[in-house]
Amino acid sequence: MNESRQKKSTTFSDDEIDLRELFKVLWAGKWLIVSISSVAAIMTVAVALMLPNMYKAEVLLAPNNQQGNSGLSALATQYGDLASFAGINLDSGSIDKTSLGLEVLKSRKFISEFIVRHNILVPLMAAEDWDASSGELKIDSNVYDLATERWMEDAIATDGASPSLQEAQKKFMEIFSVSQDKQSGFVSIAVEHYSPIIARQWVDWLVDDINFSIMLQDVSEAEQAIAYLNEQIESTSLADLQNVFFKLIEEQTKIVMLAKVSPEYVLRTIDPAVAPEKKSRPSRALICILGTLLGGILGVTVVLIRRYTFRTLEDA
Protein backbone atom coordinates (compact mmCIF):
# COMPACT_ATOMS: atom_id res chain seq x y z
CA MET A 1 0.00 0.00 0.00
CA ASN A 2 2.81 2.39 0.94
CA GLU A 3 4.72 1.42 -2.22
CA SER A 4 1.67 2.25 -4.37
CA ARG A 5 1.31 5.68 -2.77
CA GLN A 6 5.01 6.27 -3.21
CA LYS A 7 4.82 5.42 -6.94
CA LYS A 8 1.86 7.77 -7.43
CA SER A 9 3.71 10.54 -5.60
CA THR A 10 6.77 9.96 -7.76
CA THR A 11 4.61 10.07 -10.90
CA PHE A 12 2.97 13.32 -9.90
CA SER A 13 6.36 14.73 -9.00
CA ASP A 14 7.78 13.74 -12.40
CA ASP A 15 4.81 15.28 -14.18
CA GLU A 16 5.24 18.49 -12.23
CA ILE A 17 8.94 18.59 -13.00
CA ASP A 18 8.28 17.94 -16.72
CA LEU A 19 5.68 20.69 -16.82
CA ARG A 20 7.98 23.14 -15.11
CA GLU A 21 10.75 22.21 -17.51
CA LEU A 22 8.41 22.68 -20.47
CA PHE A 23 7.52 26.18 -19.35
CA LYS A 24 11.20 26.96 -18.81
CA VAL A 25 12.00 25.79 -22.33
CA LEU A 26 9.19 27.87 -23.82
CA TRP A 27 10.14 30.90 -21.77
CA ALA A 28 13.73 30.59 -22.84
CA GLY A 29 12.64 30.51 -26.49
CA LYS A 30 9.98 33.19 -26.14
CA TRP A 31 11.67 35.61 -28.52
CA LEU A 32 11.90 32.95 -31.22
CA ILE A 33 8.20 32.17 -30.76
CA VAL A 34 7.32 35.87 -30.88
CA SER A 35 9.48 36.37 -33.97
CA ILE A 36 7.92 33.47 -35.88
CA SER A 37 4.40 34.55 -34.83
CA SER A 38 5.10 38.13 -35.93
CA VAL A 39 6.43 37.03 -39.32
CA ALA A 40 3.41 34.77 -39.80
CA ALA A 41 1.06 37.61 -38.80
CA ILE A 42 2.71 40.06 -41.22
CA MET A 43 2.62 37.54 -44.07
CA THR A 44 -1.01 36.67 -43.33
CA VAL A 45 -2.04 40.32 -43.27
CA ALA A 46 -0.26 40.92 -46.58
CA VAL A 47 -1.98 37.92 -48.18
CA ALA A 48 -5.38 38.92 -46.74
CA LEU A 49 -5.03 42.45 -48.13
CA MET A 50 -4.12 41.09 -51.57
CA LEU A 51 -7.23 38.91 -51.79
CA PRO A 52 -10.00 40.58 -53.83
CA ASN A 53 -13.47 41.04 -52.41
CA MET A 54 -16.27 38.74 -53.51
CA TYR A 55 -19.93 39.81 -53.47
CA LYS A 56 -22.95 37.51 -53.33
CA ALA A 57 -26.30 38.46 -54.86
CA GLU A 58 -29.26 36.32 -53.85
CA VAL A 59 -32.93 36.10 -54.80
CA LEU A 60 -35.75 34.42 -52.88
CA LEU A 61 -38.38 32.70 -55.00
CA ALA A 62 -41.60 30.79 -54.46
CA PRO A 63 -43.08 28.04 -56.65
CA ASN A 64 -45.73 29.33 -59.03
CA ASN A 65 -48.67 27.01 -58.37
CA GLN A 66 -50.84 28.42 -61.14
CA GLN A 67 -49.64 25.87 -63.66
CA GLY A 68 -51.43 22.74 -62.53
CA ASN A 69 -53.01 19.65 -63.99
CA SER A 70 -56.32 19.92 -62.17
CA GLY A 71 -58.25 19.98 -65.45
CA LEU A 72 -56.45 16.93 -66.77
CA SER A 73 -56.94 15.14 -63.45
CA ALA A 74 -60.68 15.74 -63.66
CA LEU A 75 -60.73 14.42 -67.21
CA ALA A 76 -58.77 11.36 -66.13
CA THR A 77 -61.41 10.61 -63.52
CA GLN A 78 -64.28 11.06 -65.94
CA TYR A 79 -62.92 9.74 -69.23
CA GLY A 80 -59.82 7.75 -68.28
CA ASP A 81 -61.06 4.39 -69.54
CA LEU A 82 -62.37 5.81 -72.80
CA ALA A 83 -59.13 7.67 -73.46
CA SER A 84 -57.10 4.55 -72.75
CA PHE A 85 -59.14 2.78 -75.40
CA ALA A 86 -57.83 5.35 -77.88
CA GLY A 87 -54.27 4.93 -76.66
CA ILE A 88 -54.09 8.13 -74.60
CA ASN A 89 -53.03 8.05 -70.95
CA LEU A 90 -54.70 10.77 -68.90
CA ASP A 91 -53.55 9.38 -65.58
CA SER A 92 -49.85 10.11 -66.03
CA GLY A 93 -49.70 12.17 -62.84
CA SER A 94 -48.80 15.79 -62.34
CA ILE A 95 -45.26 16.98 -62.81
CA ASP A 96 -43.58 19.06 -60.13
CA LYS A 97 -42.54 22.02 -62.27
CA THR A 98 -40.46 23.51 -59.47
CA SER A 99 -38.30 20.40 -59.05
CA LEU A 100 -37.99 20.11 -62.82
CA GLY A 101 -36.97 23.75 -63.11
CA LEU A 102 -34.31 23.44 -60.41
CA GLU A 103 -32.80 20.35 -62.02
CA VAL A 104 -32.73 22.09 -65.40
CA LEU A 105 -31.19 25.16 -63.75
CA LYS A 106 -28.27 23.06 -62.44
CA SER A 107 -27.77 21.09 -65.64
CA ARG A 108 -24.66 21.38 -67.80
CA LYS A 109 -26.75 22.11 -70.89
CA PHE A 110 -28.63 25.02 -69.33
CA ILE A 111 -25.51 26.62 -67.79
CA SER A 112 -23.53 26.26 -71.02
CA GLU A 113 -26.34 27.84 -73.05
CA PHE A 114 -26.67 30.57 -70.41
CA ILE A 115 -22.98 31.47 -70.76
CA VAL A 116 -23.20 31.64 -74.55
CA ARG A 117 -26.56 33.43 -74.63
CA HIS A 118 -25.43 36.27 -72.39
CA ASN A 119 -21.80 36.36 -73.60
CA ILE A 120 -20.31 36.22 -70.09
CA LEU A 121 -17.21 34.16 -70.85
CA VAL A 122 -14.75 37.03 -70.27
CA PRO A 123 -16.14 38.31 -66.93
CA LEU A 124 -16.51 34.70 -65.81
CA MET A 125 -13.07 33.35 -66.74
CA ALA A 126 -10.77 36.39 -66.86
CA ALA A 127 -11.97 38.74 -64.11
CA GLU A 128 -9.57 39.32 -61.22
CA ASP A 129 -11.06 42.24 -59.26
CA TRP A 130 -13.55 45.11 -59.30
CA ASP A 131 -12.92 48.83 -58.99
CA ALA A 132 -15.58 50.18 -56.61
CA SER A 133 -14.80 53.82 -57.44
CA SER A 134 -15.30 53.47 -61.20
CA GLY A 135 -17.57 50.44 -61.13
CA GLU A 136 -15.40 48.74 -63.74
CA LEU A 137 -14.38 45.10 -63.75
CA LYS A 138 -10.64 44.40 -63.80
CA ILE A 139 -9.59 41.79 -66.34
CA ASP A 140 -6.42 39.75 -65.88
CA SER A 141 -4.22 40.64 -68.84
CA ASN A 142 -2.38 37.34 -68.46
CA VAL A 143 -5.61 35.55 -69.26
CA TYR A 144 -7.38 37.84 -71.73
CA ASP A 145 -6.17 40.80 -73.79
CA LEU A 146 -8.93 43.41 -73.98
CA ALA A 147 -7.15 45.38 -76.71
CA THR A 148 -6.99 42.49 -79.18
CA GLU A 149 -9.93 40.57 -77.67
CA ARG A 150 -7.85 37.40 -77.57
CA TRP A 151 -7.27 34.77 -74.93
CA MET A 152 -3.63 34.41 -73.95
CA GLU A 153 -1.85 31.23 -75.01
CA ASP A 154 -0.27 30.58 -71.61
CA ALA A 155 -3.60 30.94 -69.80
CA ILE A 156 -6.76 28.90 -70.14
CA ALA A 157 -6.83 28.27 -73.85
CA THR A 158 -4.22 27.92 -76.61
CA ASP A 159 -3.75 29.65 -79.96
CA GLY A 160 -6.08 32.48 -79.00
CA ALA A 161 -9.10 30.19 -78.77
CA SER A 162 -11.68 30.82 -76.07
CA PRO A 163 -12.01 28.46 -73.09
CA SER A 164 -14.22 25.45 -73.64
CA LEU A 165 -17.80 25.47 -72.41
CA GLN A 166 -16.94 22.61 -70.06
CA GLU A 167 -14.30 24.78 -68.39
CA ALA A 168 -16.70 27.71 -68.24
CA GLN A 169 -19.54 25.57 -66.84
CA LYS A 170 -17.27 24.18 -64.15
CA LYS A 171 -16.11 27.69 -63.21
CA PHE A 172 -19.68 28.98 -63.09
CA MET A 173 -20.79 26.19 -60.76
CA GLU A 174 -18.10 27.31 -58.29
CA ILE A 175 -19.78 30.71 -57.86
CA PHE A 176 -23.40 29.60 -58.32
CA SER A 177 -25.71 27.98 -55.78
CA VAL A 178 -29.37 27.02 -55.65
CA SER A 179 -31.28 25.53 -52.73
CA GLN A 180 -34.86 24.83 -51.73
CA ASP A 181 -36.39 24.76 -48.26
CA LYS A 182 -38.20 21.43 -48.07
CA GLN A 183 -40.75 22.73 -45.56
CA SER A 184 -41.71 26.09 -47.05
CA GLY A 185 -40.81 25.30 -50.66
CA PHE A 186 -39.02 28.63 -51.04
CA VAL A 187 -36.09 28.61 -53.47
CA SER A 188 -32.87 30.60 -53.12
CA ILE A 189 -30.58 31.30 -56.07
CA ALA A 190 -27.24 33.02 -55.49
CA VAL A 191 -24.24 34.09 -57.56
CA GLU A 192 -20.90 35.26 -56.18
CA HIS A 193 -18.62 37.53 -58.21
CA TYR A 194 -15.98 40.23 -57.91
CA SER A 195 -18.56 42.75 -59.12
CA PRO A 196 -21.77 43.10 -57.08
CA ILE A 197 -23.49 44.54 -60.17
CA ILE A 198 -22.60 41.52 -62.29
CA ALA A 199 -23.63 39.15 -59.50
CA ARG A 200 -27.10 40.73 -59.34
CA GLN A 201 -27.44 40.80 -63.12
CA TRP A 202 -26.58 37.13 -63.49
CA VAL A 203 -29.08 36.15 -60.80
CA ASP A 204 -31.83 38.08 -62.60
CA TRP A 205 -30.90 36.45 -65.90
CA LEU A 206 -30.96 32.98 -64.33
CA VAL A 207 -34.47 33.49 -62.99
CA ASP A 208 -35.74 34.89 -66.29
CA ASP A 209 -34.10 32.15 -68.34
CA ILE A 210 -35.30 29.21 -66.28
CA ASN A 211 -38.88 30.51 -66.34
CA PHE A 212 -38.69 31.09 -70.09
CA SER A 213 -37.06 27.71 -70.73
CA ILE A 214 -39.70 25.67 -68.89
CA MET A 215 -42.46 27.82 -70.42
CA LEU A 216 -41.20 27.12 -73.95
CA GLN A 217 -40.96 23.42 -73.19
CA ASP A 218 -44.54 23.26 -71.89
CA VAL A 219 -45.89 25.34 -74.78
CA SER A 220 -44.13 23.09 -77.28
CA GLU A 221 -45.48 19.93 -75.66
CA ALA A 222 -49.01 21.39 -75.44
CA GLU A 223 -48.98 22.46 -79.09
CA GLN A 224 -47.77 19.02 -80.16
CA ALA A 225 -50.54 17.47 -78.07
CA ILE A 226 -53.14 19.74 -79.70
CA ALA A 227 -51.94 18.77 -83.18
CA TYR A 228 -52.06 15.09 -82.27
CA LEU A 229 -55.55 15.39 -80.74
CA ASN A 230 -56.85 17.14 -83.85
CA GLU A 231 -55.60 14.22 -85.91
CA GLN A 232 -57.36 11.81 -83.56
CA ILE A 233 -60.63 13.75 -83.87
CA GLU A 234 -60.51 13.39 -87.65
CA SER A 235 -59.72 9.68 -87.47
CA THR A 236 -62.52 8.64 -85.10
CA SER A 237 -66.27 8.67 -85.48
CA LEU A 238 -67.12 7.99 -81.83
CA ALA A 239 -68.88 11.03 -80.41
CA ASP A 240 -67.86 10.30 -76.82
CA LEU A 241 -64.21 9.93 -77.79
CA GLN A 242 -64.32 13.11 -79.85
CA ASN A 243 -65.75 14.86 -76.78
CA VAL A 244 -62.76 13.67 -74.74
CA PHE A 245 -60.38 14.98 -77.39
CA PHE A 246 -62.10 18.36 -77.46
CA LYS A 247 -61.83 18.58 -73.67
CA LEU A 248 -58.14 17.69 -73.87
CA ILE A 249 -57.55 20.32 -76.54
CA GLU A 250 -59.26 22.84 -74.28
CA GLU A 251 -56.96 21.97 -71.37
CA GLN A 252 -53.84 22.09 -73.55
CA THR A 253 -54.95 25.46 -74.92
CA LYS A 254 -55.29 26.73 -71.36
CA ILE A 255 -51.70 25.61 -70.70
CA VAL A 256 -50.46 27.55 -73.74
CA MET A 257 -52.40 30.68 -72.77
CA LEU A 258 -51.27 30.54 -69.15
CA ALA A 259 -47.64 30.04 -70.15
CA LYS A 260 -47.61 32.97 -72.55
CA VAL A 261 -49.13 35.44 -70.07
CA SER A 262 -46.97 34.38 -67.08
CA PRO A 263 -43.41 35.77 -67.20
CA GLU A 264 -42.69 34.05 -63.87
CA TYR A 265 -44.01 30.73 -65.10
CA VAL A 266 -42.27 28.37 -62.67
CA LEU A 267 -40.74 30.58 -59.97
CA ARG A 268 -42.10 33.93 -58.82
CA THR A 269 -39.93 36.48 -57.05
CA ILE A 270 -40.52 37.11 -53.36
CA ASP A 271 -37.38 39.07 -52.54
CA PRO A 272 -35.48 40.30 -55.64
CA ALA A 273 -31.71 40.33 -55.89
CA VAL A 274 -29.84 43.56 -55.22
CA ALA A 275 -26.23 44.58 -55.77
CA PRO A 276 -24.71 43.82 -52.33
CA GLU A 277 -22.86 46.62 -50.58
CA LYS A 278 -20.90 44.31 -48.27
CA LYS A 279 -18.53 41.60 -49.38
CA SER A 280 -19.30 37.95 -48.71
CA ARG A 281 -15.64 36.97 -48.49
CA PRO A 282 -12.78 36.91 -47.68
CA SER A 283 -12.95 37.29 -43.91
CA ARG A 284 -9.64 39.08 -43.47
CA ALA A 285 -9.86 39.29 -39.67
CA LEU A 286 -10.35 35.54 -39.41
CA ILE A 287 -7.51 34.87 -41.85
CA CYS A 288 -5.14 37.07 -39.80
CA ILE A 289 -6.13 35.46 -36.50
CA LEU A 290 -5.69 31.94 -37.85
CA GLY A 291 -2.38 32.86 -39.48
CA THR A 292 -1.04 34.32 -36.23
CA LEU A 293 -2.18 31.28 -34.24
CA LEU A 294 -0.54 28.92 -36.70
CA GLY A 295 2.61 31.02 -36.49
CA GLY A 296 2.57 30.72 -32.69
CA ILE A 297 2.09 26.95 -32.90
CA LEU A 298 4.95 26.74 -35.39
CA GLY A 299 7.17 28.80 -33.08
CA VAL A 300 6.43 26.56 -30.07
CA THR A 301 7.12 23.48 -32.20
CA VAL A 302 10.47 24.84 -33.38
CA VAL A 303 11.54 25.71 -29.82
CA LEU A 304 10.63 22.26 -28.50
CA ILE A 305 12.30 20.46 -31.39
CA ARG A 306 15.50 22.46 -30.94
CA ARG A 307 15.56 21.90 -27.18
CA TYR A 308 14.93 18.18 -27.14
CA THR A 309 16.97 17.46 -30.26
CA PHE A 310 20.02 19.10 -28.68
CA ARG A 311 19.39 17.24 -25.41
CA THR A 312 19.22 13.92 -27.24
CA LEU A 313 22.52 14.70 -29.00
CA GLU A 314 24.15 15.68 -25.73
CA ASP A 315 22.93 12.52 -23.99
CA ALA A 316 24.26 10.43 -26.87
Image (cartoon, rainbow, N blue to C red):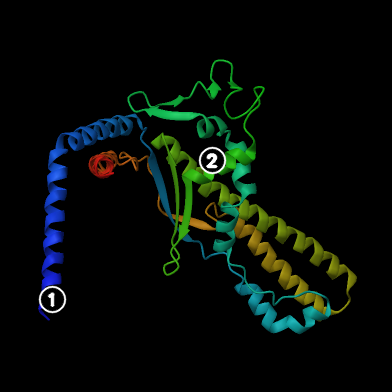
Query: Type of residue at label 2?
Result: Lys
Seen from the viewer's position, the closer of residues 312 and 258 is 312
- In percent of width and height, residue 255 lies at 64, 62
| Residue 248 visible somewhere in the drawing | yes
Cα gap from disc 2 to disc 1, whole angstroms = 70 Å
Q: Residue at x 34, y 43 (%)?
A: 280
Residue nearest the observer in this picture, 73 or 130? 130
Q: Is residue 298 visible?
A: no
Label 2 sits on a secondary structure element that is helix
Residue 138 image position (x, y, % from top left): 44, 25
Q: Is residue 276 above or below residue 225?
A: above
The image quarter containing residue 186 is bottom left
- Kindly identify which numbered label has been placed on residue 3: 1
Across and down, in percent, residue 141 comes to 50, 21
Neighbor class of circle 2 (other Cα within 10 Å; few <14, some 14-19, many 20+) is few
> Could you tell whether 34 is left or right of 161 in the image?
left
Q: What residue sits 61% from the left and 57% below the top?
A: 259
For the point 54% across and 65% down, which residue is it?
66
Circle nearer the N terminus (2, 1): 1
Q: Nearer the viewer, residue 184 or 256?
A: 184
Which labelled disc corresponds to residue 171?
Answer: 2
Q: What amino acid is at disc 1? A: Glu
Residue 171, image quadrant: top right
**Dot label at residue 258:** none
- Measuring from the top left, give residue 302's x and y in whole percent: 27, 40
Q: Quadrant of the C terminus?
A: top left
Numbered disc total:
2
**From what the image shows, is residue 218 above or below residue 303?**
below
Mark 1 secondary-structure assignment: helix
Q: State whether residue 105 is above or below residue 136.
A: below
Front disc: 2 or 1: 1
